[in-house]
Image (spheres, rainbow, N blue to C red):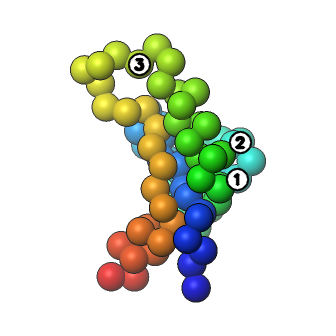
Amino acid sequence: MVENNIYLTWSDEHRRWWEPGRHGYAKRIADSGRYKEAQALEICTKAMFGRRGDHPLPEMTVPLKRVTFAVEG
């Protein structure tokens, strides 16, 4: 069962998932970090500084339950 309040963080800049402990980036979801909602939002908020309005969001949170659903079908 997937916990409801767990999030992954996607980096559009690096085209990878944030790794555990905010250390680097992972290609595979299985290797990505699991963050509480506040932690994931903090990562994304910090990435917003210096962002140009005509570019996509540099980082975004994704609920783990959504990722699991997409992978499992």
Q: Quadrant of residue 33?
A: bottom right
Kindly identify which residue carries mark 1: 20
Examine the rendered structure and indicate whether residue 72 appears above or below residue 50. below
Circle 3/circle 2 CB separation < 8 Å: no
Furthest residue in direction left, as rendered? 54
Q: Is residue 6 left or right of residue 27?
A: right
CA gap between label 3 and label 2 equals: 21 Å
Examine the rendered structure and indicate whether residue 44 appears above or below residue 73. above
**Along the viewing direction, whichever of 39 and 34 lies nearer the viewer:** 39
Kindly identify which residue carries mark 2: 23
CA gap between label 1 and label 3 equals: 24 Å
Residue 45 in percent (x, y) is at 54, 31
Q: Quadrant of residue 13?
A: top left
Kindly identify which residue carries mark 3: 51
Q: Mark 1: which secondary structure? A: helix
Circle 2/circle 1 CB separation < 8 Å: yes
Badge 3 density bin: few <14, some 14–19, many ≥20, Cα 10 Å: few
Q: Is residue 11 left or right of residue 32?
A: left
